Image: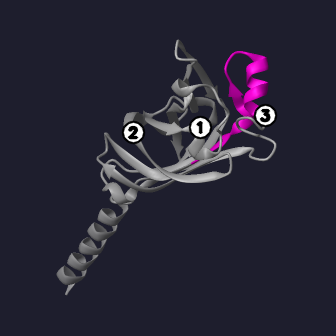
Amino acid sequence: MKWRTLAAALAAAALTFSAAAGQAADYTIDSGHSFVQFKISHIGVSWMIGTFETVSGSFTYDAEAGPEAQSVSVEIDTASVDTNHAERDKHLRSADFLNVDEHPTATFVSTGYEGDAEGGVMNGDLTLHGVTRPIAIAVKKVGEGKDPWGGYRAGFEGRVTITRADYGMGYNLGPASESMDLHLFIEGTRN
């Protein structure tokens, strides 16, 4: 009888450990180490690069779990746009572009992931300028591990190209500037 009780207890412990090991971890995005960069053609002769410096949100990640366990929710403060030129930034915040008074945030909420622990494609809905559209972001893991403060972190980068007019931003910048590249750098601390 003792052996059966011990065997049952060991089996229950093994199942509990197995379930816990398979659960993805939740992370809070570290706003001080995360940002979204964009690149757009400047009249077809050069590039204009800018950054959204205030990014927040959360993600769920586990290298051992399958694609269905990975997810992300990102919020971007559109007024945090910075192109290193005050007058241009003021114009980008206006109704001609981001219209930050009416649309103070842009969001990305994932709907599914295809890939492995090192990278793949994160599908989801991007809401920008009050318009929500599905996008697919090519992502890869930058790294993960313990930090010097006793926490555990994971970092990812992603790239996607969007068309400005798809999000109601049709201000004429010329044909070379209809689309723009977004490059996301996300670092989170495990909860």
Front residue (pair 143, 9):
143
Quarter where residue 8 is shown: bottom left
The nearer-to-camera label among 3 and 1 is 3
Q: CA distance from mark 3 to mark 1?
A: 28 Å
Q: Residue furthest right?
A: 101
Residue 81: percent from left, percent from top: 69, 29
Q: Which mark, residue 30?
A: 1
* Element carrying mark 1: loop
Neighbor class of circle 2 (other Cα within 10 Å; few <14, some 14-19, many 20+) is: many
Name which of mark 2 and mark 1 comes first in the sequence.
Answer: 1
- List x then y, in percent, for residue 75: 63, 46
What span is colored magenta in the figure? 74-93
Q: Nearer the viewer, mark 3 or mark 2?
A: 3
Q: Looking at the picture, tell me which residue is in the foreground, 7 or 112.
A: 112
**Would you say residue 26 is visible in this rendering?**
no
Q: Residue furthest bottom?
A: 1
Q: Residue at x 64, y 38 (%)?
A: 170
- What's the mark number on residue 94? 3
- The amino acid type found where label 1 is placed reads Asp
Task: Give the foreground label among 2 and 1.
Answer: 2
Q: Is residue 135 left or right of residue 6?
A: right
The residue sitting at 33% across, 47% down in the picture is 63
Q: Position of residue 45 (x, y in %)?
A: 52, 12
Q: Is residue 77 visible?
A: yes
Reply above or below: 6 against 78: below
Which residue is disc 2 drawn over? 139
Quarter residue 119 falls in = top left
Image disc number at residue 132: none
Q: Check the image and report above or below for 151 versus 86.
A: below
- The three-letter amino acid code for the residue at tag 2 is Val
Secondary structure category for the residue under label 2: strand
